[in-house]
Image: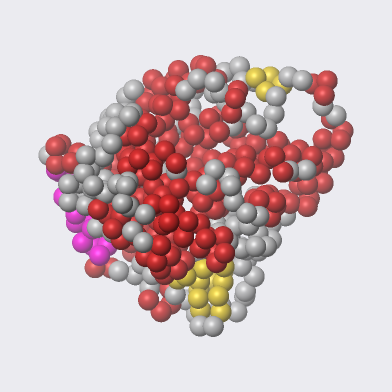
Amino acid sequence: MSWTGAADVRPLRMMLAILVLAICCGLSSAAVAQTDLPAGVSLVDGYMLRFDQKRRMLDRYGARFNEYRKEILRRGAAGDYAPCSSQILDEVDWLIGSTADDAAVERRFEALRRSLAMPEEQQKAAGRQSPVDGSWGGCFEAWFLRTWNSADPIKELIANGRRPEHPLRFLDEVDTPQKIVERFRRITTSRVLEDGIDYRKELNLTVTGLGQLLLLPELAAVFPKDWPRAQVAAALIDYMDREWQDPATGYWGAWYRFGDRLIKTEDLSITFHIASYRDGKIPRLPELIRTVFRTRELAYPYGWQDRGTQNCHHAYDVVRLIRFGWPNMSEMQRAFARAQLSIILARTLRLSIDVAGAVDTKPYNRVAEAYYFCVSLLDDLGFFRTSRNFWADIEFDSSDDLKAKLLAQLGKLPGEDPMIDAARRKLQQKD
């Protein structure tokens, strides 16, 4: 890649700005400062909540889960479309990480084992809309997972000028302002030591599914005229902004109750989803951007880092939040942002994608996720389309070559997967 517009750059001033801002914003502060937590709860790195329950579940089931995950990734890389097995794997992942329900984990592991031997047509049926409740999640049991899994297929239908074949009856669960606010209030706060459930993942995926269905303008067409979408969406936004968002940090996150103590966390992923589906039209953007910079060295979900690896998904979250905050940033903040975005781009091209355009799938449960998030990250950085480049006057000399390689790789993967379709569509968009 090459830089242009060099005559307008003041190198010493920019270097000073980056240094000062790195000092001011790069040092992490604790998202959770309590040190006298009850038995069964600990802090990792002084800020990240960890529950003994999760450690026990991972010790018991982690190795078995990883073997199944590797098998599904292997099949996906070979072009095998297995939505039922992928759905069950995602549900097992949630049960292990967020509950203490051994019986449910064992039962779903058995369902996962059987699913891998399913006839092809039965396997693929889980990737189509259910005539029963209108969701795209025939092998999920949990409602929030069916809701989350339905958003991408519905977006692809709309993008291709089509509509769902069956009514979206799964949305009956949130078809009034009262219902949706009650649901979010219930899952915002976890009482893990009391009931054995960490609602953080359910909260995030509920935001992901309902946030797109209720807040993206292009999806209004899938709702019947008598469904109160505008009122339900307004109630959700009011809850987000008045009750849930932290006014000091601009972030949203999971809350944890221990007796009379309430701990509120700063969650990169949850914040990204809310900001994205509202197209950056959210309150407290200056506070949010300061939090983005401050949490650079923290581990996901409280920061950018993912076990020391390059994860396109989490980097995409960071880039999108910086994009929303860019118009209101100071010159010093923009200098710091440019430095970090350059690093993210370099790491993505060096560590996440090989010379043949194949994406590293290790951080993901599905091959389709790996390609979708790496393509989305590069697209949001303006790597493929100069109209998307909000942060620097840069020409990317290798963008056309990489685009061709990624499209070739996508051509080897199952076209029925909506995330593959979405990645291909992003690559084929023009300025």
Magenta segment's dominant SS is helix
Task: Point out the image quarter for the N terminus.
Answer: top right
Q: Residue lying at the far bottom in this picture: please name it.
A: 260
Image location of residue 19, percent across then percent down: 81, 43
Q: Quadrant of residue 391?
A: top right
Residue 134 visible: yes
Image location of residue 389, percent across then percent down: 62, 28
Magenta stretch encompasses residue 200: no
Residue 301 visible: no
Magenta stretch encompasses residue 115: yes
Front residue of 51/376: it is 376
Above or below for 316 versus 301:
above
Front residue of 181/260: it is 181
Residue at x 61% of width, y 17% of height: 397
Q: Is 428 situated left or right of 146 in this image?
A: right
Residue at x 41% of width, y 26% of height: 425
Above or below for 82 versus 181:
above
Residue at x 43% of width, y 35% of height: 372
Q: Residue lying at the far front in this picture: please name it.
A: 226
Count how many numbered circles sit on residues in the image: 0
Above or below for 178 versus 363:
below
Q: Which residues are magenta?
A: 104-118
Front residue of 81/249: it is 249
Task: Point out the image quarter for the C terminus.
Answer: top right
Image location of residue 349, percent across then percent down: 55, 29
What colour scheme does the image use?
secondary structure
Residue at x 65% of width, y 31% of height: 390
Image location of residue 278, percent across then percent down: 52, 47
Q: Is 155 situated left or right of 79 in this image?
A: right
